[in-house]
Amino acid sequence: MAERKVRVRFAPSPTGALHIGGVRTALYNYLFARQHGGDLIFRIEDTDSNRFVPGAEEYILESFKWLGIHFDEGVSFGGECGPYRQSERREIYKKYVQVLLENGKAYMRNSLTMPKEEVDALIAEGKQYVVRFKIEPNEDVRVNDLIRGEVIINSSILDDKVLYKSADELPTYHLANIVDDHLMEVSHVIRGEEWLPSAPLHVLLYRA
Ligand code: GLU
């Protein structure tokens, strides 16, 4: 099989100015992409409508221009895997939420114990709901972290994360980032260490 092309992404949320930690993460992605003749993608993760700050996206783009970090595709750069702004990918996420629900990998509030007719009636009534990921307990989830090595976390310490909110018809970060990294053919995820505890959840989501 041909070796997979290196494709990495920097995916800020437009919640304010670009900070130095973000620049550091972007720089690692940029150097890794250039070193391997790969692609660097710029994705805007704006699924948390409450934290949206007008002008933040422009500020971030302007900062990278000033820094001389160039992206190969993404918001304002174009590319084959767009749109690259998550708020414009609603329909894509809805499709995946449906797949997870149908395969019993996710559930709506109480839908685990309520009869299906009752669930359907509540939705038809327009009641708001969230969809949660259903995590099976007591499984050792292994993450291949290039810096830390094999990281093992038992699924019993993970909670059933919210994946989707009907209120704004948007997924949460966890679902959107998995769907996008998959569809945008991202080969390596390079991000701040604060995301390491979420990595086992992401492994389970990829599988589901
Ligand atoms: N939107 C996330 C952030 O701004 C990106 C995390 C990731 O790279 O997956 O921190």
Image (cartoon, helix red, strand yellow):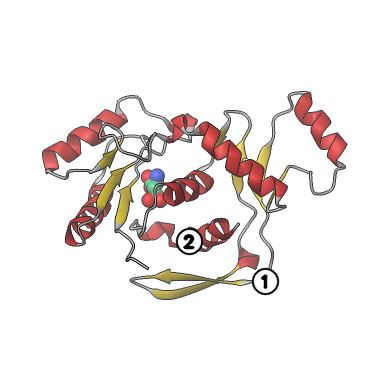
The x, y position of residue 45, in whole percent, is 41, 39
Identify the residue at horizontal 18%, vertical 56% (top origin): 34
Residue 58 drawn above or below residue 164: above
Q: Residue type at mark 2?
A: Ala
Residue 132 drawn above or below residue 150: above
Task: Determine whether, in the image, residue 61 is placed left or right of residue 142.
Answer: left
Task: Determine whether, in the image, residue 158 is placed left or right of residue 56.
Answer: right
Q: In the image shown, does 22 or 149 lie closer to the viewer?
A: 149
Residue 138: give its label. 1
Q: Residues within 10 Å of mark 1 (few under 14, many from 20)?
A: few
Q: Residue type at mark 1?
A: Asn
Identify the residue at horizontal 44%, vertical 45% (top origin): 180
Residue 199: give its label. 2
The x, y position of residue 118, in whole percent, is 86, 35
Identify the residue at horizontal 80%, vertical 33% (top origin): 120
Q: Quadrant of the N terminus?
A: bottom left
Mark 2: C-beta under 8 Å from nearest atom of ligand 1: no
The x, y position of residue 174, in whole percent, is 51, 48
